Amino acid sequence: MASSFGAAQVLVASNRGPVSYEVRDDGSLHAKRGGGGLVSGLSAIGPDAGALWVCSALGDGDREAVRRGVGEDGVRMLDVPADVHADAYNGIANSVLWFVHHMLYQTPLEPVFDAEFRRQWASYEAYNRAFAKALAEEAAEGAVAIVQDYHLTLVPGMLRELRPDLRIGHFSHTPWAPVDYFGLLPDDIAEQVLRGMLGADRLGFLTRRWADSFTACCDALVGGLGSTEIGVHGLGADADFLRRRSHEADVDERMAALRAEIGAGPDGSARRTIVRVDRTELSKNIVRGLLAYRELLTGRPQWRERVVHVAFAYPSRQDLAVYRDYTAAVRRVADSINDEFGTAGWTPVVLHVKDDFARSLAAYRLADVALVNPVRDGMNLVAKEVPVVSDEGCVLVLSREAGAYEELGEDAIVVNPYDVVGTADALHEALGVAPGERAERTKRLAAAGTALPPARWFLEQLDALRS
């Protein structure tokens, strides 16, 4: 009798897929390919591996592509109803689970788990169920399925019920909250999330700290891990891609434009640069970084006109009011620093908010100091990318709350992200590091930051699941 199972041997499930579509004015569909670690990983296993990526239709173009039956080999896009997706993605994943794991709530006022939360949670369940059903349909007998991130925490348990023959993995790209903070969730929801995750054979985390936090939550709330294995896979930067891409013509053009914005010091010498590149994500701590730079200029006036803070803060999740407010606060503080300290020939903060990858790479190459000061971050690839690309070597000022701290802390200047004076002191120290030491630090940071490049990161998890 023929098997009723699908043909895919390796499956990846994530909210965002490797391709997105837009409807052009003439009604045609235009496909845009994405990048990142999962794309690299799936391409590394080769075209004959029977791989399938299951993802969600995210916009009108994606939904139209599904309706027309347009798609790419190796991708199945799910047309989850737009209102269900909005509830699951913005209402639960980004406004509840993200806030819990990054410990972002202002607890005197939030969270409030009311009837509206329960309504949105039902959408989150439906969204996860759609993924579990699609994976169950597409997977060959005994296939491997690796589910990605906090959007899909319930999928492993749901999929286990539908297809007990599969090898199921889940990878968390965020931190994991400590027990007391995770306990903000209603008891039944906290248990549902943990038991959903524990449907996997193997769970992957970016650092030992996040893995230990998950284990502690399981011990406290559901009686332990059961038979689920835990692995740590610290995603690294893709050195070959970054080095090649950062020397293309458009990056050289952006470097020339940035050098013009930075300008020269009063004596004609090159100004020093403190570079940050982030999304305007609440956890990235951009405002306190700007305040630390103001503290540097206030307390150490010798740096006035000699240093420029190149700050790229690319808008993120602007459909949520709290993110729009945060983006406005970043602009406001940058403008106030320029008003207070700027001169005819010196703009202390060069702020850009329009996403431009080539310009980000140009800033990486120009960086004397890289400032990475999140209040909490699963990893933070910027901390790993800048040392790879930097032309003259850079000093990394790094928050102890970034996942990257575990690998890069020894060769960085480490800060408490809430301590603005301490961060200003660290920036001063970083600007004073001698060129020889700077080059040595950069070499060690680049080696540590590229130890597990994206393709190997994915294959390592795949091999662990299969074995």
Image (cartoon, rainbow, N blue to C red):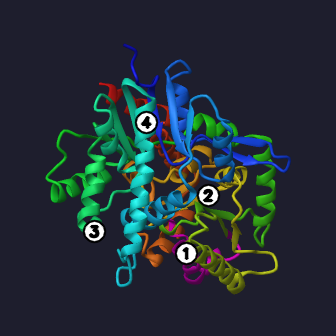
Residue identified by numbered label 1: 287
Q: Main secondary structure of the magenta part?
A: helix
**Residue 315 showing in the rendered view:** yes
- Give me the residue at 38% from left, 33% from top: 461
Q: Are marks 1 and 2 in contact (CB under 8 Å)?
A: no
Compute the Cα span from label 2 to label 4: 47 Å
Residue identified by numbered label 3: 186
User: Tag 3: residue type?
Assistant: Pro
Mark toward the start of the polypeptide (2 vs 4): 4
**Image position, residue 58 (x, y; %):** 60, 52
In the rendered structure, which segment of residues is drawn in magenta?
A: 284-307
- Is residue 291 covered in magenta? yes
Mark toward the start of the polypeptide (2 vs 3): 3
Mark toward the start of the polypeptide (4 vs 3): 4
Residue identified by numbered label 4: 135
Mark toward the start of the polypeptide (3 vs 1): 3
Q: Is residue 330 above or below residue 98?
A: below
Q: What SS does tag 1 mark?
A: helix
Q: What SS does tag 3 mark?
A: loop
Which circle, 2 or 4, is nearer the viewer? 4
Front in this rendered view, residue 189 or 65: 65
Residue identified by numbered label 2: 368
Q: What SS does tag 2 mark?
A: loop
